[in-house]
Amino acid sequence: MIYLTVALVLLWLLVGGYLVFMLNRQRSLERELRTLQEEFQDRVSSDQA
C-alpha cells in the first residue's frame, strides 16, 4: 500500500511541475508576442511617416 501512496504523490508532483512549467512558458510566449507586436507597430508607423 505504501508503494501506491508514493506513486500517487510522485504523479501529483510531476503534474504540478508540468503545470508550473507550462504557465511559465505561456508567460514567456505572451511577453515575446507583445514585443513583436510593438516592433510591428513601430515599423508600420515609421513606414507611414
Image (spheres, grey):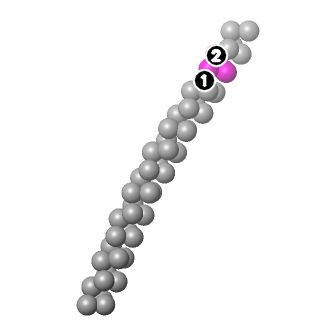
Q: Is residue 44 left or right of residue 26?
A: left
**Residue sitting nearer the eye, 18 or 29:** 29
Magenta region, residue range: 6-10
Instruction: For the residues labelled 1 and 2, say whether their Cβ atoms are less than 8 Å apart.
Output: yes
* Residue ID for mark 2: 6
**Residue 6 quadrant:** top right
User: Residue 45's x, y, as percent?
Assistant: 30, 83
Name the spot of residue 1 as percent of width and height, x first.
74, 9
Compared with 37, 21 (above or below) is above
On the image, the x and y values in percent for residue 14 come to 58, 31
Q: Secondary structure at mark 1?
A: helix
- What is the three-letter code of the residue carrying label 2? Val
Mark 2 Cα-neighbour bin, 10 Å: few <14, some 14–19, many ≥20:
few
**Residue 37: in magenta span:** no
Residue drawn at x 52%, y 34% as measured from the top left: 17
- As drawn, 11 above or below 38: above
Residue drawn at point x = 68 percent, y = 14 percent:
5
Location of the C terminus by quadrant is bottom left
Mark 1, residue position: 10
Q: CA distance from mark 1 to mark 2?
A: 6 Å
Mark number, residue 37: none
